[in-house]
Image (cartoon, rainbow, N blue to C red):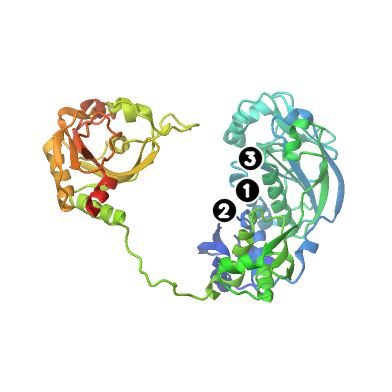
Amino acid sequence: MDITDLQRLVGDDFSLDEFVERIPMIGATVEKLEGDEIAVEFFPDRPDLFSVEGVAKAYRAFMGWESSDLSKEMMVEEGSGLELVVDPGVLGIRPVIGAALITGVNIDEKALISIMNLQEKLHITVGRKRRKVAIGIHNADPIKAPFKYWAASPNEISFVPLQKDEKWDLEQILKEHEKGVDYAWTLDGLDRYPMITDANGEVLSFPPIINGELTKVSEKTKNIFVDCTGWDLNAVTLSVNIVCSQLMARGGKLHSVTVTYPDEKGFKDMDLKTREWPRFDWIEYEMDLSWARSWLGMELPSGQVVKALNKMGFQGLEVKGNSVKCSIPPWRGDILHQADIAEDLAIGIGFENFPGAFPNSNLTGSEREFSTLTRSLRNTLIGLGYLEVRTISLSNEETQYKMMGREEVDHIKITNPITTEHTMMRASSIPSLLNILKANKHRDLPQRIFESADVMVGNNSHNVIAGLSEDNKASFTAIKGVVQKLLSDLELKFELEPAPLGCYIRGRGAAIYMKGEDGIKDLFPELEMKGRSILGHFGEIHPRMISEMDLSAPVSGFELDLDLIIRSIEK
């Protein structure tokens, strides 16, 4: 944000030092303060704070400097007399559209930059890279109502897109224009594309790709027409409201536009009907004050509640008995439950004003046994030259069963996998570790890695610790020494037997058994229990697996059942 612009919007009470100190209390982080610029990062649930105008408005309220009633000041003044007609042909392509007219906006270079920045931030966040929502901001003077929202074939219409000086058709824009190349994916599979034109057939916008050069906004622009298209009515409504509130903070007056929909029964569930836009309504909400007091752990006087919520931008506050009524600003899309209002109540009070309290219980906390165990094993492995890594819990049947030389057993499948690499919850961590070695095969040897991971056996989650060593000297004897060191440090008694596991070279793989309750039998059905528990296994990785991972040196590895180890230690 430009500091001079921020100061102008906040007012004479603005102090940069005070702003840097107080703005984190709203839920922000000051990332950088350099020259005339300040970078502040807000939580993604507050897109209304993605512009200097939104920050200034929220900061003024938080500091108690907002004297006017915004619910009366920031509202739709009157209808513009403009109409936007929706053609039935566009309903199956990009059905939701909202619009607004803002007149008398004071635009200079800084305001123009802020408008464009907000537009792109909303595209990325609320708009999901324009697929869900796309916003058009236009100079309203060169165009004439009524406007039409319709679908055109790729070569049916041409216009001069932004930053160009000659007409392009839609197909050419998608293939050659910078924005067309970036966002053509949002229209994949369509043979007709959405268009917004005016009464003279002039193009305002080709959403969600690019606006026309005709309606380009400049520092001389005073009257702005806003369009917003997408697939989600709530997201479109919020985006229009945020943009309108920003332009109103620049002195603009908000006027409604009539959006006329055809009578299409298939879209009634989306509330797509003829009405005035924007849907700039202050929503009345009632919060249970007794619940909020209990939730926050404070006995809050009514006056303190009203003052705190006023600081967070709520209007029309009224406390009656055990409830508080308030009006939620139309640019706040994060208020979904009374817990959200209670959170703002806490912010308005100031977290620094919450008293500390000692717990009623005299018990003290302690480290979980699982954490103690894994920390001990990690320290041992690090001491043996192993590096800890983290991998994701998703894998696929090809690596978990076929490559590992195992029988396929019941496992958790992903219903709609994004990639063929992630179609199931892994049953072993070894393939994941092999992928790490594959990704780092250009590194010097030896490479020794391990991880504490979750695996799924049937519908049950289990904790394991697994490790691999890629080394020209990797052998059964070397990995046996690592496993024996880990288990002897835990003072566990165990037995070793040859294990016919497909992931190891025949005769160079061993299973670790203990007397007692069953361990993870189904993880490797090839191993017989014989009244014992399978604590884990280790050995030299089969050359077939090494070849499939394109590795050049021998690999040895192990996998241990942490859950069984903990049960054994407890006994």
Q: Marks 3/2: CA distance?
A: 16 Å
Task: Report whether residue 381 is seen.
Answer: yes
Left or right of 27 on screen, residue 377: left
Residue matched to label 2: 44
Residue kind at label 2, given as amino acid type? Pro
Q: Quadrant of residue 201?
A: top right
Q: Residue 122 got which mark?
A: 1
Q: Marks 3/1: CA distance?
A: 10 Å
Q: Of 1 and 434, which appears nearest the observer?
A: 434
Report x, y in % for residue 86.
Answer: 79, 34
Q: Residues within 10 Å of mark 1 (few under 14, many from 20)?
A: many
Q: Residue furthest left?
A: 477
| Residue at (78, 57) in percent of width and height | 252
Q: Residues within 10 Å of mark 2 (few under 14, many from 20)?
A: few
Report x, y in % for residue 323.
Answer: 70, 66
| Residue at (62, 43) in percent of width and height | 127
Mark 3 and mark 2 residues within 8 Å of each other at the beta carbon: no
Q: Of 82 and 519, which appears nearest the observer?
A: 519
Q: First in sequence: mark 3 or mark 1?
A: 1
Residue matched to label 3: 132
Q: Residues within 10 Å of mark 3 (few under 14, many from 20)?
A: many
Q: First in sequence: mark 1 or mark 2?
A: 2
Residue kind at label 3, given as amino acid type? Lys
316 over 243 or under it: above or below: below
- Give the structural element (helix, strand or loop) at label 1: helix
Mark 1 and mark 2 residues within 8 Å of each other at the beta carbon: no
Q: Nearer the viewer, mark 1 or mark 2?
A: 2
Q: Of 448 and 16, which appears nearest the observer?
A: 448
| Residue at (32, 64) in percent of width and height | 366
Residue kind at label 1, given as amino acid type? Leu
- Give the structural element (helix, strand or loop) at label 2: loop
